[in-house]
Structures are given as C-alpha cells and as structure tokens.
Image (spheres, rainbow, N blue to C red):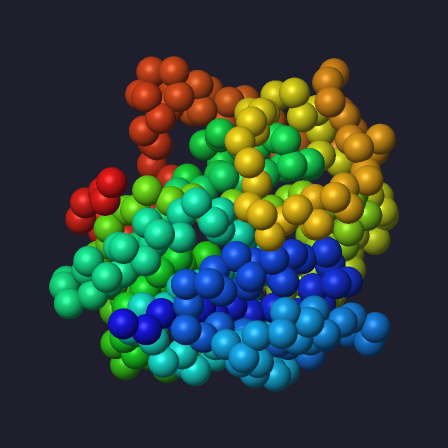
C-alpha cells in the first residue's frame, strides 16, 4: 500500500507559512510528497525551505499562477489538483501549507488506510480540526469555524479539489476550469477517523497576518478590488481579545518546536478587555455566532447546526 502526501504553496516565507513543518509532519508515513510551488515573489525562499528537508521522498512541481483564468479562489484548487495528479499512491494525504499533524495520530491514520484499502465504497477520510488563533495557546470552538474536513482521498481521477481548495468532490468529465461548479458533482463517502489537523493559519505576527490576509483576498477578489479594500487598512492585523477563546493545554506536534520558539509578538496581542469598536468584527465576535456556538456547545453537546458539510459520513472509526 502506497500513501502519497501532496500540497501547494506560494510565498511561504514572505507570508509566514509553516510549510516545512507541514510536510515533515506526515513524511514518516508517506511514500512520496508532491508539492506544487508557485511563482514566488523575489526574495521568497519557499523552494529552499522545502529542499532543506533533505528527503528523496519530496517531488517539487514548479507552477505559474493565473488568477484571471482561475478567479474567486479557484487557483488554490487548480494548484492543489496539479500536485494531486502527480501522486502515485493508493491513498492521497492532502495538507495545506498551514496544517500540521501531531505525531500521536500517525499510527491511527496508517491503520485506517490499511483497513479500508480494498473497500472501494470509502472515498476518503474525515479529520477533526483545531483552529489556533493569535498565539499557540488559544483556539476556536465556534460555529464560524469548520470542525471537520476531508484530508485523505482515494487516488481516483474523478476526485478533484473543490471551490477554494478547502475540500474535495467527485466531478466526472470535469473541464478543469470551473472548480466551483455544483451541478454534476458528488460529495465523497468518508469515514471519520480519530485524528486532528492542527491549523495554524491564523497564528502569525500581526504584520504577517495582515499581509497573508491581503494575499488570500487577492486570490479570491482580484488585485484591483483588494487595492481598494486595503487602501487605508492598518499595517497590522487585530486579533481582538484572546480570553474569549478556548485555552490549549495539550502538546503541539514535535515538528513545530522550532517554529513556536520564534513566537515574539505577545506584546502585540490583546488578552483581555473589549474588542476595538473601530474595526469590523471577526465572525466569532458577532452575536449571531455567539448564540449558535452557545447552543451547539452547551445544549447540543457539540453538534453543529448547519454549516459547511461537504461529505457523506458513513461511520466514525475509533
């Protein structure tokens, strides 16, 4: 049984992505790791970061991003598909550039792949998520954040990255252009395994967080629109008060040790008090989401009301 890892990235060092740590976190259990590296800005050293891992399992594909051909975030899905197509494994393990797997889950993941290798009814595996925010000690338990997502898929040419690369769908006869199409697409049949993805996408020094947010908005809204939006925007991102979030008391993945040691923006974070009334509220700060979160966590025992659920859950694997 072969397992391929795959991902895509552009401007990792410029935008403070822990892509090296993401790759290293699952490298012990994959037979190859395919990564599509976009046309990075001058001075960015994404390729050097990946090459410094020093593993012959890693395969780099150089790409050029085209936001006109793939607007509205679809270039993310297109780049993901480029890496996926180059994978040779029976199972394909996708990680975004800010997602890391704790080593304590690796055996669970491999065992699930082995157990369901010949069960063609199973098209993928669903992972739970921990979304960190601001620093490495706080994370979201909020209706505004997806609690689960597909991260391992079967190597089926009909399965494609979907929308803005958050998830996957089976798309027969896909034109490889419209990654946001709904008609003629099928949700994957998946099994939920008892493992988490640690998402560090919102843990950066405030100036890097603002730059990353602007870059992501450019992929979704276009450079002209984003230039207007950020014309008078502050240079640093405001995370708001962190004491409203859950406190993380477990361990982080070992591969994150050196990355976390770089944490030096504590004095720029707000740990108590009220949010800045002059900025737009974050989703988790809005009354609607506070009420929904309270109902889900205190009344429904964590069961989500509605929300994005791009899969057909067959069972939970313990």
Q: Quadrant of the C terminus?
A: top left
Image height of 272 relative to 23, above or below: above
In this rendering, the count of numbered labels is 0
Q: Residue at x 42, y 68 (%)?
A: 30
Image height of 257 relative to 296, above or below: below
Q: Picture coordinates of residue 187 (x, y %)?
A: 26, 59
Q: Quadrant of the N terminus?
A: bottom left
Instruction: Say whether residue 122 is left or right of residue 32.
Output: left
Instruction: Say whether residue 207 is left or right of residue 316.
Output: right
Q: Picture coordinates of residue 255 (x, y %)?
A: 60, 52
Image height of 289 relative to 91, above or below: above
Q: Residue at x 73, y 18 (%)?
A: 272
Judge by depth and name the residue closer to the eye, 19 or 56.
56
Q: Residue at x 46, y 63 (%)?
A: 28
Residue 237 visible = no
Residue 179 occupies which quadrant of the picture? bottom left
Residue 299 visible = yes
Residue 303 occupies which quadrant of the picture? top left
Q: Picture coordinates of residue 16 (x, y %)?
A: 72, 56
Image height of 273 relative to 253, above or below: above
Judge by depth and name the residue closer to the eye, 111 or 293.
111
Q: Residue at x 44, y 19 (%)?
A: 294
Q: Picture coordinates of residue 258 (x, y %)?
A: 71, 50
Judge by depth and name the residue closer to the eye, 87 or 282.
87
Instruction: Say whether residue 134 is left or right of residue 186.
Output: right
């Amino acid at each position: 049984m072969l397992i391929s890892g795959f991902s895509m990235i552009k401007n990792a060092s410029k935008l403070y992505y822990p892509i090296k740590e993401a790759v290293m976190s699952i490298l012990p259990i994959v037979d190859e790791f395919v990564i599509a590296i976009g046309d990075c800005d001058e001075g960015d050293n994404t390729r050097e970061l990946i090459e410094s891992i020093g593993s012959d399992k890693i395969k780099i594909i150089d790409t050029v991003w085209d936001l006109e051909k793939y607007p509205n975030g679809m270039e993310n899905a297109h780049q993901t598909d480029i890496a996926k197509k180059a994978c040779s494994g029976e199972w394909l393990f996708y990680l975004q550039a800010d997602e890391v797997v704790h080593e304590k889950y690796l055996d669970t993941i491999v065992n699930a792949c082995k157990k369901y290798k010949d069960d063609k009814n199973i098209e993928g595996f669903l992972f739970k998520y921990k979304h960190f925010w601001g620093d490495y000690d706080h994370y979201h338990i909020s209706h505004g954040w997806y609690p689960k997502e597909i991260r391992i898929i079967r190597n089926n040419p009909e399965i494609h990255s979907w929308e803005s690369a958050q998830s996957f769908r089976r798309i027969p006869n896909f034109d490889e252009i419209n990654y946001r199409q709904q008609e003629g697409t099928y949700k994957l049949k998946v099994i939920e395994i008892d493992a988490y993805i640690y998402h560090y996408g919102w843990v950066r020094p405030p100036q890097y967080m603002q730059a990353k947010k602007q870059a992501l908005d450019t992929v979704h809204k276009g450079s002209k629109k984003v230039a207007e939006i950020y014309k008078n925007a502050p240079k640093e991102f405001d995370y708001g008060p962190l004491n409203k979030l859950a406190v993380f008391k477990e361990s982080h993945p070992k591969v994150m040790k050196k990355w976390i040691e770089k944490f030096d923006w504590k004095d720029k974070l707000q740990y108590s008090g009220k949010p800045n009334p002059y900025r737009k509220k974050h989703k988790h700060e809005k009354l609607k989401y506070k009420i929904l979160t309270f109902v889900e966590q205190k009344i429904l025992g964590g069961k989500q009301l509605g929300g994005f659920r791009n899969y057909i859950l067959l069972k939970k694997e313990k």
